[in-house]
Amino acid sequence: MRKILLVVGGSSDVGIAAMSAMMEQYELVVAHYHHMNEKLLELQKNAGEKLLCVQADLSDGEETKKLVDTIREKNVIPSDILHLPAAAWQIRRFHKTAWEVWEKGLQISIRSAVEICAAFLPEMARRKRGKIVIMLSMVVNGMPPKYSADYVLVKYALLGLVKSLAVEYADKGITVNGISPALMETKFVEGMHDYVIAMNAQQSPSGRNLSVDEVIPTIQFLFSEGADCINGQNISITCGR
């Protein structure tokens, strides 16, 4: 059985860092991306045949299906899955948030997670092993921030998916967990006002926002044998918030 990691949202800052850290643990890493960028190109150059990049716009349901079909056609069914994609988090008042915004978030995060897991979990179950890690957010811990209802809805739905899949596939040797970082200063938050980013830092006991490198070790651990009995959990990475 080939050990293959599928990273959905592989062109993100977290995706690039996670693949860089875990590349040697897998025979092949399949990186989904929407837009190719310099970091992913550099990683592809360095990794050579160990990294397969596949493009898809997850806001389009048909492209999500094509992503699954491409993975099947190339016979690179994953043994493990890291799911990262999300629509950019922006401050919006609830009554001024158009339905198209909600729908885009659901397509990018929920539909992609559901369709990808539904496609590959049966094979993982037959192999009696597999690990799935889904990016959640600190917004599912306690009261969420104001003016973020669309983002919060998506993350709570993903948390429900984590819990549901964990209990359904536990007897098949599969673990499904989520991680909930505090705000990380990545390109994901470029659309936020500077004062919002600064305010998040001030509210942290550490007095700063997270870096991507502080999240990667938890992801690595959840894909390791040491996490075989950790299942259905939401792991907070928040410096005590």
Image: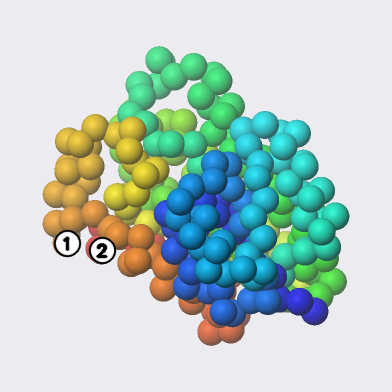
Numbered circle sitting on residue 206: 1
Q: Position of residue 120 (x, y in %)?
A: 77, 59
Label 2: which residue? Answer: 239
Residue type for callout 1: Ser
Residues tagged 1 and 2 counted as in contact (Cβ below 8 A):
yes
Query: Taking the image as drawn, is residue 162 in sight?
Result: no
Q: CA distance from mark 1 to mark 2?
A: 6 Å
Q: Residue furthest front?
A: 45
Identify the residue at image location x=51%, y=51%.
11
Q: Dot 2 lies on which element?
A: loop
Q: Nearer the viewer, residue 35 or 49?
A: 49
Relative side of 240 to 138, left or right: left
Quadrant in the picture for the C terminus: bottom left
Relative side of 28 to 180, left or right: right
Q: Nearer the viewer, residue 8 or 109?
A: 8
Identify the residue at image location x=37%, y=44%.
187
Q: Nearer the viewer, residue 166 or 2?
A: 2
In the image, is residue 172 above or below residue 207? below
In the image, is residue 55 above or below residue 238? above
